[in-house]
Image (spheres, rainbow, N blue to C red):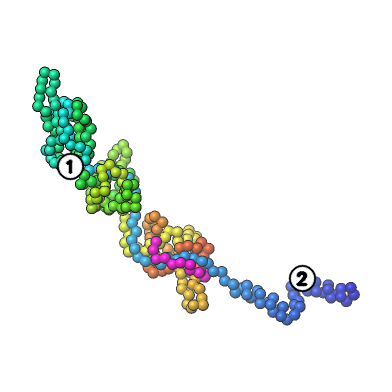
Amino acid sequence: MKYSDKKNAALITVLSAAGIIFCASAVSCKQKQAAPAAAEETETMFAVNTYKTSEGSLDEYLEFGGDVSSVSSVDVLPDMAGKIARILVSVGDMVQKDQIIAYVDASRPGMNYSASPVKAPISGRITSFAPTVGTMVSQSMSIAKIADTDELQIKVNVAERFISRISDGQTAVVTFDAYPGVSFTAKVFEVSPVLDTTTRTMAIKLRVEPADPRIRVGMYARVRLVTNTRKNAIVIPEASVVTRNAKDNVFIIVPAVSESEKPTVRISEITRGISVDGRTEVISGITAGDEIVVKGQGLLNDGSTVNIISVSDSL
């Protein structure tokens, strides 16, 4: 290599280190200058799912378990001690008040008595009949149980910490394992004025309205007692709320002004009310009709450009 070539090579190395870039041609130089400009124009776009808000209602509730029983249920006691001589009814039979359901023979060796009739104290259905013919019974022994199965109740014991939220006339949604997916409506019609000192619970009774023949005595009921109802409230999915700087926020969609543009988002601080089953009430911060981001909001910032994948109007 000639001395002049070595000198030129050294000069190029120094100038390159100083930040001066040489282009082989004018075209290549323009391409290199345009590349950073194109990179600067690239804009990040986030795919999101949204929900169109509207006014609705939200019910706050407590859940309990209870047993179905008859409002009117009595034990049948014989008037005399002796052996069951005859049984005139079966479990499940309907009987009328004062109807004879059995006879008791009080005879003893050397003493013969006429059979004593056992009468139904109320009208209803025979729900149990324990003894059989020949069984010895006494006046203090219940031989049968009669219940009015047309009027049923659900007995629930409420823990002491919840009693301030219980009142007469409250509504409830009741479900049974025997009928999955089916809900029944009930109302509180009796609230005990005292608590059980052993369990620290208060007894309440609910009545299914309207009465349904599918519900039977002895069934286990799952009771969802409504304690607070918010009407005309804006309710949103709880997962749509983003907490930043210890404040609750949602991202509201700002529509694009032209077809060539994409919508953006605006962050809005909200005040929350009650939250139930993954839904939350919004007291302030958004209005009915606002479209909010419910999925994909984790990486968003105020003013971010979004691509709306789907819009829902139901929770």
Residue 36, quarter of the rendered image? bottom right
Residue at (39%, 63%) from the top-left corner?
314
State the SS at label 2: helix
Asked if the magenta segment contains residue 309, the reply would be yes
Reading the image, the residue beneath label 2 is 17
Residue at (9%, 27%) from the top-left corner?
114
Give the mark nearest the N terminus, 2 or 1. Answer: 2
Q: Over which residues does the magenta segment extend?
A: 304-315
Q: Amino acid at mark 2?
A: Ala
Q: Position of residue 234 (x, y in %)?
A: 37, 64
Reading the image, the residue beneath label 1 is 94
Q: Amino acid at mark 1?
A: Met
- The answer to whether 86 is drawn above or below residue 255 in the figure is above
Q: Which of the pair 101/146 is nearer the observer? A: 101
Count numbered badges in the picture.
2
Quarter occupied by the C terminus: bottom left
With 149 as the anchor, is 234 left or right in this view? right
